[in-house]
Image: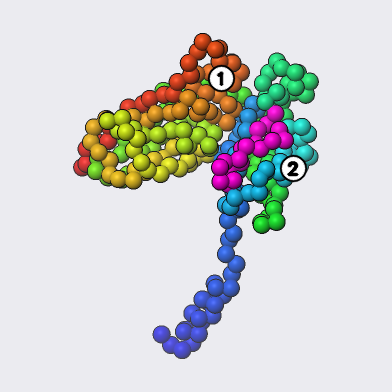
Amino acid sequence: MTPACRLVALLALGALAAMPLAKAAPVEIHPAGPVVPVNLLRFELRFDRPQRLPFDVERLKLLDGQGIEIQHALLDVALPDADGRRITVLLDPGRVKTGVGPNLEAGRALKEGATVSLLVAGSDADPSPVQKTWRVTAAVSHPLQPQLWQLGAPRQGSRDALTVDLRTPIGSAGERLIVVVNGRGHRVEGSVTLDDGDATWRFKPARPWATGRHRLVTHPGLEDPAGNRRCAAFEAPIRSVETCEGASLEFTPKPAS
């Protein structure tokens, strides 16, 4: 390389080094996809660091398509995870559920066909605000349907991920309410992620897949973003005589090729 070429290369490297690195958002906002149902029940916030508790719901603003705050949409009590990094905030269930007082008086906070945004104000630790926008679609008022999920079986002896197409999103906190059990009934250890707008569940085992049948098991409390569970939709209260059970789906790792 000639001296002139070396100089050009060094200048180019210097320019790259001087460029600011893209900063990751301090919080992920869920639902992660581009749409939400008009009967959405909750937002879930995943911060990159623990938050001061109790979480100040005043940091959140639900905005309509014109950027105007939708009044009295959110409950003023947030539900934090144990480490303070995941915060669940409910829309007022009384406005979501049809036929009850707040719903009859004020209607749902979201309007089908409109756009809505959640603005999360910054904190002293990270002053950058974050905002996510969705298109509001029709209500989802049927029970969760795990029987429609499609499982992509991994290969025996590999650590390939088990991929589950959930068909529709689940609440992001629900990723930990689905587990894999081996043929002896023991839980298989591994790591879990949600992708594709919270509609794909992936499980990567800590050790290679064993042969034989396995099961995907859901907790009875697993819900979609509108609060629908397997045993009943949010609009249909569970009767005291009913037992709400999780689902169990069998799969067998494929023979290694």
Residue type at tag 1: Ala
- Residue visible at 58% across and 56% down in the picture: 24
Q: Which residue is mark 1?
A: 233
Quadrant location, the C terminus: top left
Residue 11 position, x and y percent, is 54, 80
Name the side, left or right, on which 74 lies relative to 137. Answer: right
Amino acid bearing label 2: Glu
Can the viewer see residue 251?
no
Magenta stretch containing residue 208, yes or no? Answer: no
Q: Is residue 222 above or below residue 50?
A: above
Disc 2: CA contacts within 10 A as few (<14), some (14-19) or many (>=20): few
Residue 37 locus on image (x, y percent): 62, 29
Q: Is residue 251 left or right of residue 96?
A: left
Element carrying mark 1: loop
Contact (Cβ within 8 Å) of mark 2 with mark 1: no
Residue placed farthest to the top in the image? Answer: 241
Viewer-nearest of discs 2 and 1: 2
When the figure is inspected, residue 7 is found, relative to residue 20, above or below; the finding is below
Structural crowding at the residue carrying mark 1, measured as other residues with C-alpha within 10 Å and reported as few (<14), some (14–19) or many (≥20)? some
- The magenta segment is 74-92
- Residue at horizontal 38%, vertical 25%? 248
Of residues 124 and 204, the one nearer the viewer is: 124
| Count of numbered tags | 2
Residue 118 screen position, x and y as percent = 68, 41
Residue at which label 2 appears: 58
Q: Main secondary structure of the magenta part?
A: strand
Could you tell me which secondary element the residue under label 2 belongs to? Answer: helix
Asked whether, in this view, residue 170 is left or right of residue 192, the answer is right
